[in-house]
Every structure is written in C-alpha cells, then in structure tokens.
Amino acid sequence: MAKVTIYKTDGSLGESYMEAVSRVSPTYINMSFERRVELILNYFLDTNNAVFRDYQNGGYLKAWPIPDGQLQIDLDWYSILYTGSFSTEGSRVTSVGILDGAGVYTEYSGDIRFQGLPLITPLEGNSTVTALSRVEPSGSEGISILGNFIVTSQLAIQGQVEAWIYQGVDSTGKVLREIAGGGNLVFNNNSGPIDIISGQFTTVYVDTRNFPIVNPNVLLDYIFIEDASIPISSSAATTDILSGNDIVTLTGTRGSVAMIA
C-alpha cells in the first residue's frame, strides 16, 4: 500500500502522477527509469573519455590555480574546474565541473584522487563519486543522480544509485521537477556500457514552480508517492505505479482530506 500526498494551490483535487509527469521533457517521458540512469552514467564516462582525448590530442591550452582551492584547465573544446587540494605528488578533488564548447555542463562530486595534478596524471586507485549531473545549454533542463560509485584509473565504474532527478521548463512555462528516490540500483560497466543489474525505486516526487524561480520554496503543486514498488523497467508514460487501496491525502489552500483510493 503506497502513501500519496497531493498539494494544490488552486483548490482542485489535483492530478494523477501520470498527468503530472506527462509534462516532463519528451526525451524522458517514454524512457524507462533503467534507461534514464544508464544514460547519465554513460554521459559521465563519455565526457571524461572525451576530455582526456582532447588533452592527449594536443588540446591543452592553459591551467591556472584559483583562490579557495580551485584549479581550472582549458582545452580546445572543454573547460574543467576542479575543487580540492592539488600537488604534483597527488591531488584530492571534491568536485569537478566540465563545460564543453556547445554549452553542456557536467558536474560530479565525491572523493576523487589523482596521482599528481588532475587530468595530467591518472586517477589513483578507487575514487568515489556521490553525485553526478548534466545540464543542457542555457539551463533549459538538467538531470542528476545520487548514490555511491567507485571509479578506477581505467574508468571502470560500479556502485549503487539512490535517486534520479529531472528539472526543466514544461509545456506550460512552469518549472517541473521529478525525483525518483529510495533506490537501490546496482550497476557496473564490466561489459562496456553501463548495465543496471538489479534494484528499484520506492518513492516518486513531482512538483511545479513558477518560472523564473524567485523563491525555490514556493510551490504551485506537488505529488509525493512513497512506500511504493517502482520497477526500473517502468516509464512515466506507460506505468501507473499505484496499485489501488492506497492512502491518498489531498492538501492545499482549502484544507486537506485523506482517503483510501
């Protein structure tokens, strides 16, 4: 039995989860949760491989330290900003931001260690990444995942994903955010591309805010589903994750009501 909380500011009874996520980018509406997670993890691998190829092919332009523990390296196509502590004897990085020539921004954070200076020397042993995001040009939409991933010097990667997050401007001009959480997705890239081996999500949250966002805490509506079983093979467009006999609470400016639905 899932628990569903729906909040509306216009006094209506709300909309279904399916109706809410129908406003998600067409890129993701028909995509399974498994494919969504694999996509961003493969973005991570592809981007890091492309950055290294750019450097190897003579794309190195300049590098300089920035106050507050940052190091910037500019290549032909990529600009990379590392945050952490740096030394030719070994560097420990807490976040990496990569901006490409098309305006796509990739960022990841965790405990990332290099044998010397970042990029110029390989990763040292097993580094860990706990958050990863990709934002399209002009910030029109972005996706993120949270979890715990181990990355080796050869970009072999394995670990667990706990949450998948989307944010973008929907067809009505509002900012829509979707979060699949409570995950225990296990993955690796032993066979090449990322492969989700097992797992599921147990919560889904969708909210809407005005654009541009003046106060991120002011919501127009939200739907929160918890204690559910959400297979990674399901997609927002094809699967209703409610199974009936669920506890639904409707809240908003006109009070609240609870029911079994």
Image: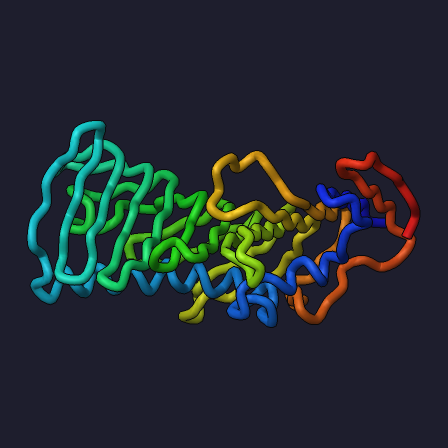
Relative placement, left or right, of 189 versus 9 is left
**Image-quadrant location for residue 257:** top right
Residue at x-position 47% and y-position 51% = 144
Q: Vertical placement of 124 versus 166: above or below?
A: above
Coloring applied to the structure:
rainbow
Relative placement, left or right, of 212 versus 204 is left
Residue at x-position 51% and y-position 35% = 215
**Residue 180 position in % (x across, y down):** 62, 52
User: How many numbered marks does the figure carry?
Assistant: 0
**Residue 253 position in % (x across, y down):** 76, 36
Relative placement, left or right, of 18 versus 55 is right
Residue at x-position 79% and y-position 39% = 251
Between 94 and 126, the one nearer to me in the picture: 94
**Residue 20 position in % (x across, y down):** 68, 58
Q: Vertical placement of 19 versus 167: above or below?
A: below
Residue 180 visible in rendering:
yes
**Image-quadrant location for residue 7:** top right
Q: Vertical placement of 3 versus 53: above or below?
A: above
In the displayed orientation, state which residue is furthest to the top: 68
Residue 183 visible in rendering:
no
Between 249 and 62, the one nearer to me in the picture: 249
